[in-house]
Image (cartoon, helix red, strand yellow):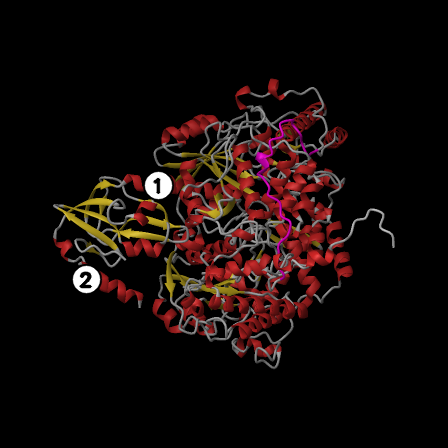
Amino acid sequence: MLAAVGAETLEDLFRSIPEGLRLRRALDVPRALDEIALFAEMRRLAARNETDHPPFVGAGAYPHHVPPVVDQLLLRGEFFTAYTPYQPEVSQGTLQALFEWQTFVCLLTGLDVANASMYDGASATAEAALMAARVTDRRKIVISAAVHPEYRRVLRTYLASTHDEIVTVPYGDDGRTDLAALARAVDDQTAAVIIGYPNFFGVVDAVGEASSLARKAGALSVAVTTEAVALGLLKGPGELGADVAVGTFQSFGNALNFGGPAPGFFATRQENVRQMPGRLCGATVDKHGRRGFVLTLSTREQHIRRERATSNICTNAGLCALAATIHLALLGRRGLAQLARVNYARARLLSDAMRRAGFGLRFAGPTFNEMAFEVGDAEAVVARLAKRGLAAGAPLARWYPDDPRMKGALLCVATELHAPELIEMFAQAVKE
Amino acid sequence: MNFPDDLKYTKEHEWCRIKGNRVVVGITDHAQNQLGDIVYVELPEVGDPVKKGESFGVVESTKAVSEIFSPVSGKVVEVNDPLSDAPETINEDPYEEGWMIQVEFSSGKELEELLDVDAYKKFVEEEAE
Amino acid sequence: MSNPTGWKPRIEQESGTAATHPEVGAGGATSGLAHEERLLFEHGAANGRTGVSLPPAGGDFDPERELPPELLRAGIEGLPTLGELEVVRHFTRLSAWNHGIDTGFYPLGSCTMKYNPKSSEALARLPGFANAHPLLPPELAQGSLELMFQLERALSEISGFAATTLAPAAGAQGELTGVMMIRAWHVARGDARKRVLVPDTAHGTNPASCAQNGYDVVQLESGPDGRLHPETVRDAMDEDVAAIMITSPNTLGIFEAHIAEIAEIVHAKGGLLYGDGANLNALLGVARPGDMGFDVMQFNLHKTFATPHGGGGPGSGPVAVSEKLVPFLPLPVVVKEGERYRLVNDGKERPRTIGKLREFHGNFGMFVRALALIREYGPEGLKATAQLAVLNANYLRARLKDAYDLPYETDSLHEVVFTDKAQKPTGVTTMDLAKRLIDHGFHPPTIYFPLVVHGALMIEPTETESKETLDGFVDGMHAIAEQARTDPEGVRASPRKPVRARLDETRAARKPVLRWRPGMKVE
């Protein structure tokens, strides 16, 4: 091969790189491992994580059972080792699955159109704010303090250079957004009103009321969902009046993976479709009239519109979206409703067990599978349970240090993975 | 390629038909041919001001986006609304049914700067080289 | 030999009808058994099947009684009602309609479609990694944190920078992060600046990332040799320019040989150099962007190391920076204190950080795969990656340049760009050539990109392909060039073998159908 390319050595292939710019030593990375040694080393690392029990912490990433079917299908090389479906004739599998993903997102959120996925819920939220600013030609973003704090940090980072104004609205004692404060904050300069559903405290927030406020002011309302299993029981945010629904479908088919990757989603009303970020898959026909699918409305995107694109996003979370699609296909109408009910019931078991152990709820508002308990010194509880290999929950004071109400609040989750006995054991362990 | 000789043209491939104090504006047969199948068009609203040489709208094919530039300054007095539902009209009949906007122009002087059919034909030929 | 049934094999006669056998493409493509498959939502079993096994809800809890009724929904109309086997068949059939790297050669330029060892996949699925919650107390997550620390160190060494953030979710978000740090650095010096210079060969994400950061983009023309020239940069450079974004090797596969001089020009006016690391695979172990004057660079872990491309992600886009940008790194940052690892997630510890880019810590699953590959390859293996990627690309270049127009004679590294100019007289275009490759059993190269090349065919074979595969591809390309001369209609009528012929993209865009709805016929 060297002869065919007119080179004598492999080094000759790099003659276009000036001498002075070449690396004249070996890279200082550990020497190569054979597969057996590699597995030993990686197993050593994995064993340094303690994951024997399902964590009692959710806060944006939820422990759920992933049926083995999901991974079996996902690992089919034809899905797994393909890329963005630029050549639709040889990508119909990916494309139809994306069309099905978009449909699932629409059905669950109650909105008209969804894109082919986003990096995560946080960047999807930031993109929703940017879209609202484009659609309304306004620059003020109103967001509830009960939206996931990490999402709000990402929003701030994304908006830092565009000089949009971010106004944060407080929550009330029921854990819901303070609607009176929200009404004061929303005005004729407001582009978006962003609210969690359920919110960071696990409380089912007032999407309907927030959406009417937004509509009256000519702003878009954005509902953020981190625990999408809730949508098996609760109305879709679109049904309650939201114009945009964003968040993550990690709960469907995606393992925790220490926080990523997971499929962000983005759904909105039909009239905003040309302002959406990200890829869209659409139905069409081939030249013999047979149904097929293609990426469409691409002129919104960076590879065509460059600096005037609706977003810079290119690679998204396709495979994670496929995992969620497979899991949702398995669940179906009945399974999703059942999964949501099991989650609801396990969380009620948890709150009962905690109440019996002497720990009340921090917030009075309605919850799904996550809730904050008053446990005294939340950080101490976390540290104590960690010694037993249990991930206890998220002390809310970490994110709300200035709110004295949060001092003893521990945010906990219970899902279908938390067996009743484990829940009981957990409540007792918090008490000890 | 069709180049009607009763029209004026721009180097951005718009055509104008002068009607009293108004001009009707569209894109030329050459332009639609270069773009390919047009799938979307974004036009201003009646009453919007336009400025000579500045973008007043966008036409899109599946793989390209092209801005449309106003040949004169003035005010939009009519918009070809049916185009948004049937953008293919621009491909099929760029000079009649495919017109885009009518502008009431503020200065007749700008009209003199437009190309006549021969100048435009020549420009297109040069551009192709 | 007795044959009690009296049935006689007719193999000989059947082989006599060979004319009806489909042609075999240079990549081995022939026809197979593919199934038509409806949408999940069109299967229409109304008997309420489900493909999952769940416990009963248990307890005496009733959301209908306990939650406000206006918040509750009945079952969602339209969701499928399928059993496990039906779901398995559905997706197995869909998968058969795809071409992946595991199926065949996939020389999609700039996307680096290399084969990833399956070991990386198995390792990412170790329960200790897969089941780790991102908010585990640090003492329960030392393995994840140590892995992140190791990867951060390895990436910094490989790229020649001081430190690396692992947070960004994909290359484009890495670009956004890098440009944010550049902005933060300028702002901290009291000089926000307005513009970023981007060569015309850049990926579309470059200008889009700048715009998303509030910068105006100035496009620079590359020279007739496909390189960016110092004079061009000098003319465009002034004190309002925050940075220049350079991909090297660029999207033509050409190394930006004037980079040192360009760095001098940009730095002299107070600007910074952003390196788009999308093509870093060409340089692994051979040269390091950090040694060339770049101040910041993003990786695309899914291109350069091991991560499945997954039909469009997930990716991972760590960003490496020189010393002066370290204070601006986004959070979290993993630190080692004695023998313990810890995530710094609080802005108070890092007051100049640009903030957070995504929830939690980045695409950890991709970190496992990337580190596994780096550990499996070691320093020699990483260098061999670059060498073989460049050798393979140059081999294709040498063998194809007689049949196809090569617009730039300049040396190529990991990818090479051809055009359809030689086929022009026959009426066959780049699109037709690409579609014909499908019938041979190859995924087409990237087409019509970079935009500076008319009718571009951008070929990136990667290091993992064998000479035999490359020779097969060359045979296919030659056969197509020949067919374009003798039977251009045949080329234009392709592809014939996939489950679908060319699709009507115009129709899809004019009347977008982006989802199924209950009662709807998608057609």
Circle 2 residues within 10 Å: few <14, some 14–19, many ≥20: few
**Residue placed at 46% from the left, 63% from the top?**
C488
Circle 1 residues within 10 Å: few <14, some 14–19, many ≥20: few
* Residue type (three-letter) at the residue carrying disc 1: Asp
Q: Nearer the viewer, residue C63 or C181?
A: C63
Q: Relative to residue A161, is residue A233 drawn left or right? A: right
Q: Position of residue C186 (x, y in %)?
A: 42, 58
Classify the position of the C terminus of chain A by image quarter: top right
Residue C403 magenta-highlighted: no
Q: Position of residue C58 (x, y in %)?
A: 72, 24
Q: Relative to residue A326, is residue C522 drawn left or right? A: left
Residue designated by label 2 = B118
Q: Residue furthest top?
A: C65
Q: Do discs 2 and 1 belong to a common subunit? A: no
* Residue type (three-letter) at the residue carrying disc 2: Asp
Q: Nearer the viewer, residue C494 or B81?
A: C494
**Element carrying mark 1:** loop
Classify the position of the N terminus of chain A by image quarter: bottom right
Q: Position of residue A301 (x, y in %)?
A: 44, 50
What secondary structure do most residues of the magenta stretch adopt? loop
Question: How far, Cα to Cα, is label 2 from label 1?
Answer: 43 Å
Label at residue A367: none
> Dividing the picture into quarters, in which one does residue C242 lie?
bottom left
> Range of the magenta residues?
C28-52
Label at residue A137: 1
What subunit carries mark 1?
A
